[in-house]
Amino acid sequence: MTHMKTKLRHTLYGVLLLTGLLGNMQAAQAQGSVSLDVFYSELAPYGTWISDAQYGYIWLPNVDASFQPYATNGYWVMTDYGNTWVSDYPWGWAPFHYGRWFYDNFYGWVWIPGTEWAPAWVAWRSGVDYYGWAPLGPGVAIGVSVGNYIPDPYWVFVQQQYIYGPAVYNHYVYYRNDVTIIHRTTIINTTHNYRRRVYFAGPSRQDIERARGGRVEVRSINAAPRPGTTVVRDRSIDVYRPVVRRDRNGNERPTRVTSPEEYRTSHPERREGQVRSTIAPEGTTTNRDRDTRQGNDAQRTRQQLNATDQPVQQRTREQREQREAVDRNSDQLQPGQQREDRGRDVRPAGQNTEQRNTLQREQVEQQREERRREADQTNQQQEQDNVRRREVEQQQREDRRNEAQQQLRERQQQAPQNNQSDLDQQQRLQQLQNQREQAEQQRTQQQEQQRQIQSQQREQAEQQRQQQNQQRQQQEQQQRQQAEQQRQQVEQQRQQIQQQRQQVEQQQRQQQDQQRQQAEQQQRQQQDQQRQQVEQQRQQMQNQQQRTPRQRP
């Protein structure tokens, strides 16, 4: 009987502590090494694994055509390892810190798995008050001439003062909008070493502080226990970064793989050279024969597990990309507006162009206002989803607590003869369970506070962007007013010149009339004098004839 009691007590103790030990086991496992299967299994719900003849298994994320790695849905922070890319995608812990990206005319951006971790596998440029970065392709080594192996359209630039912050995408300058920046910048060759692996660290903290005119917070990197979205805190970031090792026997492979032919068949809407990123260059080609790749049919798993989070993330991603498109259209419109303003100084007919530009600016502002309203609605929907998720988690904790209490009551009913020590042991176990639940609740509260802080930061960034837009509008209005004043001054000067020219022409006409009248008068006087002289001579001749007598024959 005593043996049975001891066995029952040990069993109960093991059941109650299983939840707490499981978390510790997962944390310990995260610090160890894993195989490439972690990529194959964790990324399967968010994309398609394709069998490639040259690179093996490659991953195509479920994103739209405007996606570009290290530019879409993320931002930069400074850490102990240098400039670190923080992705808002739930799968961002893997493709932005392991492996390489390349662009294909049919697929778009595709990721190749790798085993080396880095804060970001990108190359950096600096110059003319701009920082630029571009993803490193497969086979590109870390060296001085790395810029020769990266196509120009892959680069994204931003003014140095805007390099940090969740709203950095509002200040992107893409190669297609300004092809001159890349030729006025140079490669940043600063490198760091992590576990004997060298990577580009980008601009240093001191350079960025000089550019921003303020202090830059350097965060430490903590190893998260499980895959998921990177969490940014005041002094650290939590990211899942296990040590990845390849299987010597080569037994690693995704559960579901598709071949290029099957993917093309299942996506008839795509054609070579038609489905392209709006960021990546048109006409980028690959030097691989796509007709020899083989594999099995691609199917996505665990979609229902993420059905609650994915719509919100999709709306957020679409909203950000729409705002980027509106900002790019506005930036492209401004130089033309300035040229038309300058043209109005000398061409009054440019008023029609000014009206068209005003209408275009109003349309852009309306689009921005619509995007802001949609972003507010998306944030509200996301907050509601978070509230529902927290309610579900709270209900699950209550269910686990009730289940544990029910198990305790059942054990007490089954073993009424337990001594006082058994009851004390059960009470201690119950206290441990309560402590674990309190710790879980505190962790949830901390996560909620972190989300609120991030939401406030986004709101502040949005307010800053609105202020910048207002300042830009004020500057544009001032420029238009100045241009209008200059045009009026030019018009006044033109009228004065016209009046002066008319006065000069009138004076010249009057002088010419006077001279003509004088000449005509002189000619008449001379003719009269000549006529009088002729008349006098004629009379004299007549008089002489009358005085002289006729001679007879």
Image: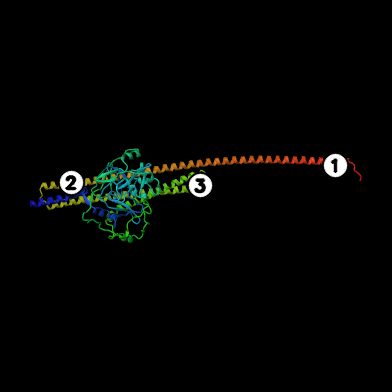
- Identify the element where label 2 is drawn: helix
**What crowding class fits label 3: few (fewer than 14 Cα within 10 Å), some (14-19), or many (20 or more)?**
some
For the point 15% across and 50% down, the residue is 14
Percent coordinates x, y for residue 222 in the rendering? 25, 44
As drawn, the label of residue 350 is 3
To which residue does mark 1 refer? 542
Spot the residue most to the right. 552
Kind of residue indicated by mark 2: Leu
Percent coordinates x, y for residue 289 in the rendering? 32, 58
Percent coordinates x, y for residue 521 in the rendering? 72, 40
**What crowding class fits label 2: few (fewer than 14 Cα within 10 Å), some (14-19), or many (20 or more)?**
some
For the point 23% across and 56% down, the residue is 252
Kind of residue indicated by mark 1: Gln
For the point 21% across and 51% down, the residue is 400
Query: Which numbered disc flags the more N-terminal residue, 1 or 2?
Result: 2
Could you say which is closer to the camera, residue 205 or residue 256?
A: 205
Q: Note whether residue 49 is visible.
A: no
Question: Coloring scheme of the render?
Answer: rainbow
